[in-house]
């Protein structure tokens, strides 16, 4: 994180000075601003070097810099690094295996990650690429409610692949579908009772 220029590192002849209380003092010479900071036993910090004249503030620089770094760390923590998770299929994937992989994809999408689905062909399977397209079409259809397809299937040698991204409101959609499934289960169990 770049540090601001402080005290004698500042080179401007005149600066717009802000006092330690946050109130504007006005445009003063650099020497006068430095004297003002020295009298307050604080630092003169160049907050906005590109302004005309540069804006300087009288404050405790070590405390200011610590707070600035702390805010940057907090902001970095809140950012989500989007990863691309890959799930591989064969052209003849069984239903149970397909559902297991689909549920993993939903888990990855719920974590706001992209998912790349790959169908790998071996040997004579290359003659039946339509089976791979069928698998990818089925996954697109099954995840249409919660994911957007980034691009149509891409063929690369012995593989077919698509990448999907979670919809912006995926959390709300999943909550609503879970709630409606719960209601169906509840009403179904009520009707079975004698």
Image (cartoon, rainbow, N blue to C red):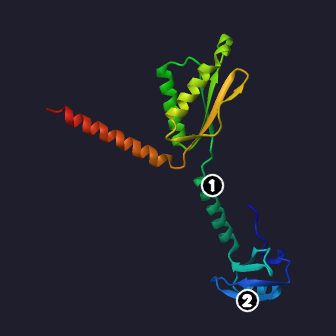
Label 1, residues with CA under 10 Å away: few <14, some 14-19, many ≥20 = few
User: Which residue is painted at 62% across and 83% down in the image?
Assistant: 21
Q: Where, quadrant-wise, is the N terminus in this rendering?
A: bottom right
Q: Residue furthest top?
A: 124
Q: Percent from the top left, x then y, of residue 97?
A: 50, 22
Residue 148 can be seen, yes or no: yes
Label tally: 2
Q: Residue at x 17, y 33 (%)?
A: 193
Identity of the residue furthest to the front in this view:
130
Question: In the rendered image, which quarter contains the C terminus?
Answer: top left
Q: Nearer the viewer, residue 35 or 82?
A: 82
Which of the 4 quarters of the picture holds residue 183?
top left
The correct choice, above or below, for 137 with respect to 95 in the image is below
Residue located beneath label 2 in the image: 26
Query: Disc number at residue 53?
Result: none
Graded by Cα atoms within 10 Å as few (under 14), some (14 to 19) or many (20 or more), the crowding at tag 2 reads few
* Secondary element at tag 1: helix
In the depicted view, which residue is nearer to us: 156 or 8? Answer: 156
Q: Which residue is mark 1?
A: 76
Q: Position of residue 88 (x, y in %)?
A: 60, 25
In the rendered image, the residue lying farthest to the left is 194
Of residues 128 and 161, which is closer to you in this image?
128
Query: Looking at the image, is 80 positioned above or below residue 24?
Result: above
Q: Is residue 12 above or below residue 97?
A: below
Quadrant in which residue 108 is drawn:
top right
């Amino acid at each position: 994180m770049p540090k601001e220029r402080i005290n004698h590192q500042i080179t401007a002849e005149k600066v717009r000075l802000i006092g330690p209380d946050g109130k504007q003092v006005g445009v003063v010479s650099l020497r006068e601003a430095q004297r003002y900071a020295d009298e307050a036993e604080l630092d003169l910090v160049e907050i906005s070097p590109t302004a005309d004249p540069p804006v300087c503030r009288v404050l405790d620089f070590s405390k200011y810099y610590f707070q600035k770094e702390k805010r940057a760390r907090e902001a970095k923590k809140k950012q989500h690094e989007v990863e691309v998770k890959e799930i591989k299929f064969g052209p003849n994937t069984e239903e149970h295996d397909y559902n297991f992989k689909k549920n993993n994809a939903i888990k990855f999408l719920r974590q706001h990650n992209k998912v790349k689905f790959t169908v790998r062909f071996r040997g004579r399977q290359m003659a039946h690429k339509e089976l791979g397209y069928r698998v990818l079409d089925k996954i697109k259809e099954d995840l249409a409610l919660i994911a957007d397809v980034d691009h149509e299937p891409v063929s690369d040698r012995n593989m077919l692949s698509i990448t999907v991204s979670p919809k912006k409101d995926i959390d709300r959609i999943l909550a609503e579908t879970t709630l409606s499934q719960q209601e169906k289960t509840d009403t179904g169990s009520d009707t079975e009772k004698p």
